Image (cartoon, rainbow, N blue to C red):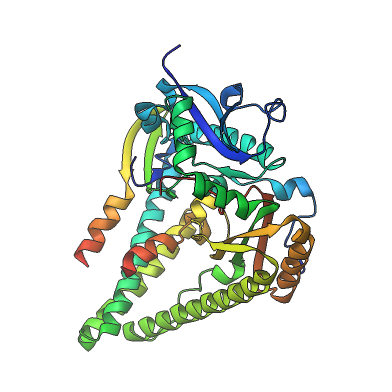
Amino acid sequence: MGEQGRYLYAVCRGLTPEAVDGIVGLSGGRIDLVMEGDLVGLVSPVDLDEYGEDGLRRNLERLDWLEEAARGHDAVVQAAAAIAPTAPTRLATIFLDDEGVRRRLRERRDAIAAALDRVEGHEEWSVKVLTRVADTEPEPVPVASSGADYLRRKREQQEARFADDHDAHFVAERVHDALVPVVSASRRLSPQDPRLAGHEGTMVHNAAYLVHRDRSGEFVDRVQEQSDAYPGVVVDARGPWPPYSFAMLDES
Amino acid sequence: MTDGVRLLPQRLETDPESIQRDLMRLVLTIIELVRQLMEKQALRRVDAGDLTDDQVEALGTGLMHLENAMRELREQHGLTQSDLNIDLGPLGTLLAE
Amino acid sequence: MSSTAVAPAASDNRAIALVDLLDRLLGTGVVIAGDVVISLAGVDLVELRLRALLRTIEGDA
């Protein structure tokens, strides 16, 4: 076995070794706890061949490796978030040893504590708004009497598409406004590339909402109301998820 | 680390039976992409107002012929617009910058 | 057409699509570079760099 490092999945508060007993880490490995004050880092030992700088550079460009690592990381985060306030770390946050992890927890104590306070008792919900496919079917070639006429009709088509997009964005803002009163925080994310996300239509809204567990029923009801109110768009809500968008610990 | 993780490369697996169809779809996808870029750019130039009437006419006629030719090519190969899987979303932004 | 915005089955709804998970777990976005490797009979033959091609076209415009 080559050199080993520590893979950090997340930082929690109030986790005990017994609580993480059944949780399985990357590649079926065990979960260890690194304690610093009341902060608990969840780590697994990993081979630096695979997770060191060179290994990561290779592996991060392989979709199969990326998928397995992301799913493995998420499994640990989800198990932890179910039982304790959890601040996840970015994929492939590696330390050489436990002392390195402790040092990070010490140095970032305030930010980590603030993140844990923010998400305690909360879950993340994803809400996307998309145009319906019919809206994005291309128009037939305009029958035009001249080159200039053709361009004129093309511009009209473009402006109609723009207006449709504009309407969809307007609806997205209304949906967002309806959800804000029942959430503790929201965060807008970039719309996704359909070639990656596989959706039809145009994604005009992609946001994460931090919802208190006691209000999740209310949140879901509001989403459904908005979906019913705007049949011209698709409102796609998923959750509850761990608070990835509200408690991510990274370099910045 | 690099400034983006790329899902790279997509692989087009072909075999002697399917290669013509697969390559044709790839080629038509690229042509369609270029055609849409040309169309966007032409409209921009027309809006900018620095073209003569003859140039505008020539651009429009050329693009009209091109769009008709593309439609025929697609139909010949039994492909619909959505088969070519073009969404200028992210690339459309590239143009606007 | 009426539709349920939130999938009724709890397990369906909780599932995180890979693209959503990667968006959150990676500090940077995941992009498609628009490259295609053409492979015939299992042999990689050609890599087509679409983004480089498009940049060239734009540059002339």
Q: Quadrant of residue B21?
A: top left
Along the viewing direction, whichever of B8 and C6 lies nearer the viewer: C6
Q: Would you say A196 lies left or right of B39 here?
A: right
Q: Quadrant of residue A231?
A: bottom right
**Residue B30 visible somewhere in the drawing:** yes
The quadrant of the picture occupied by the C terminus of chain B is bottom left
Q: Would you say A180 lies left or right of B3 here?
A: right
* Vertical relation: C39 (above or below) A30: below
Q: Quadrant of residue B9?
A: top left
Residue at point 64% right, 58% down?
A210
The quadrant of the picture occupied by the N terminus of chain B is top left
Along the viewing direction, whichever of C30 and A146 lies nearer the viewer: C30
- Coordinates of residue C52 in the picture (x, y in percent): 27, 51
- Coordinates of residue B46 in the picture (x, y in percent): 28, 82
* Vertical relation: A208 (above or below) C24: below
- Coordinates of residue A33 in the picture (x, y in percent): 59, 28
- Coordinates of residue A25 in the picture (x, y in percent): 60, 27
**Residue A244 visible somewhere in the drawing:** no
